[in-house]
Image (cartoon, coloured by chain):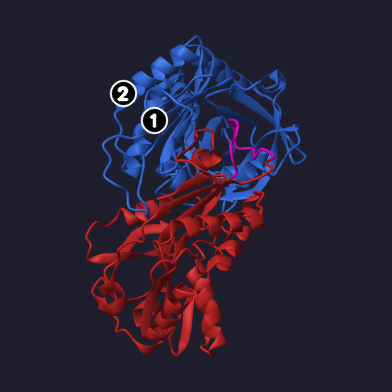
Chain colours: A blue, B red
Amino acid sequence: MPSWVDGRPAESLSIKDRGLAYGDGVFETIAVRAGRPPLLEYHMARLSTGCARLGIALDVALVRTEILSFASKLGEGVAKLILTRGDGLRGYAPPPTTQARRILQGSPMPAYPSVNAEQGVELYPCATRLAEQPLLAGLKHLNRLEQVMARAEWQSTEYAEGLVRDISGRVIEGVFSNLFLLVDGVLVTAELSRCGVAGVMRAALLERAKAVGIPVEIRDIEFDELLAAQEVFLCNSLYGVWPVRAMAGHHWSVGPLTRTLQAIARDLLDN
Amino acid sequence: MPSWVDGRPAESLSIKDRGLAYGDGVFETIAVRAGRPPLLEYHMARLSTGCARLGIALDVALVRTEILSFASKLGEGVAKLILTRGDGLRGYAPPPTTQARRILQGSPMPAYPSVNAEQGVELYPCATRLAEQPLLAGLKHLNRLEQVMARAEWQSTEYAEGLVRDISGRVIEGVFSNLFLLVDGVLVTAELSRCGVAGVMRAALLERAKAVGIPVEIRDIEFDELLAAQEVFLCNSLYGVWPVRAMAGHHWSVGPLTRTLQAIARDLLDN
């Protein structure tokens, strides 16, 4: 599997990198199929937002070119891109940088059981709550201890994903997925202005759903609304859409809207 | 300046390290004087707490021995220790580790202006607020984007430190220091159970203050209490104690309790 640092093959990095010191950077997990990265422009848009918010200099054209070359070399699998503020001296003050450091790592596509997509998954109800930090909400930054702690809550393969809520108990997302509900004919997903990661598949599905006339709402979701939803599904940019069939003794059936969005996601990843 | 990874001279690290990927680890910034690390047992105690909370395996004796050897080699300056969960595959799930990865970096002692300790500092009132995450509060973990953003708010050397408050506006700490107030004869510092970093100098000063009969309270601090305090000072394990003389047009005088604690801090760092 290839791995690059700043465009050159490398498997190691300076220990002075601020990505290590402070999580001072952002990342993208990019599906690669037949040497191409689907959803590339969504990934680029999120990188731009993240770097702008953190004040990290980003050469969009250079990064796009590197992702394309890397994907072509990788062929099939996952390209993980980490952008950091580069090396730092001691201290939190961001040094003036000319260029974000680019780290690309290839790995095989995870072998998710096909039953996840076909019959749906059971969610583990995580006790770990997401803190509210509007300055960082929505970004896929490198400060991910909350996700590490939430994911560490279960070991059983019975649970394909976990549900994470915010400090107030509102429903936010999965540990490595976004969550959608069908509520009275409306496709609902959580507002991510206080916490959560705004996934690229979430963005793509919202766009496509609107385009085909499905009513969409982005708003706060109370826990009871999740339980009462007619359909529930998860999405991310690697597996597409997984229906949610159960959590903590509660059951949902896999419905037609979920299957429609699943087909759209499959289409997005195939192109 | 020496730098070690897992006890051996090295300046680079695997790009698979989870410290880089997720900020999955903790760190300590350790003063080194005449080849010795003062406050070592306070640093070790915080490392133990942090690793226990994150579920990272820590060989306390090994880490203590490495810090002592590194300090002896460094002589004078700062030893920064980063402990991470080590390499990971893709995905948040913590792999079973046998041993935390140890990264030690030496740097010169920062050349703080002597006027900071002598006449006191002006605080920059940071707009960045700390999110409330009880699972991580108090730890010196590697998820430090809030501190990076707060520190990026000012460039002028007029401000030696910044004040950071929580989401509700309560007074928590400096960007790289803890904060103490004198309120009606009581030494007060913020409760750090929802956010903030519990500094080793804070812990040492609290212990010494109690030992010499100074009344101490650890509790929530409203912004108005800071403004009304008779004395205000900052501390950390590198510079000891800095009186705070001003913030946003408000002024405090440097009082006798601050000078007492400053002498105690000097003594702690000299031994």
Name the residue beneath numbered marker 2. Answer: A62
Q: Main secondary structure of the magenta part?
A: loop
Is residue A98 rendered to the left or right of residue A128?
left
Determine which of the numbered discs, if any, sits on residue A24 in the image: none
Q: Amino acid at mark 1?
A: Arg
- Using the rendered image of the protein, determine whether residue B143 is visible from the camera's viewpoint: no
- Counting residues from the N terminus, which is met first, the one under dot 1 or under dot 2? 2
Name the residue beneath numbered marker 1. Answer: A102
Q: Residue A150 in the image: state x and y as whole percent.
A: 63, 44
Nearer the observer, B99 or A112: B99
Magenta-span inclusion, residue B139:
no
Please give the name of the residue rendered at 66% of the width and 23% of the height, measured from the top-left corner: A255
Please give the name of the residue rendered at 36% of the width and 39% of the height, measured from the top-left corner: A86
For the residues bearing labels 1 and 2, Cβ distance under 8 angstroms: yes
Is residue A216 rendered to the left or right of residue A84?
right
Dividing the picture into quarters, in which one does residue A55 lie? top left
- The boundaries of the magenta stretch are B85-96
Magenta-span inclusion, residue B89:
yes
Name the element at disc 1: strand
Q: Amino acid at mark 2?
A: Leu
Q: Residue A246 in the image: state x and y as whole percent.
A: 73, 34
Please give the name of the residue rendered at 48% of the width and 76% of the height, measured from the top-left corner: B268
Up-down relation of residue A236 to residue B131 (above or below): above
- Using the rendered image of the protein, determine whether residue A116 is visible from the camera's viewpoint: yes
Marks 1/2 same chain: yes
Q: Residue B185 in the image: state x and y as whole percent.
A: 45, 90
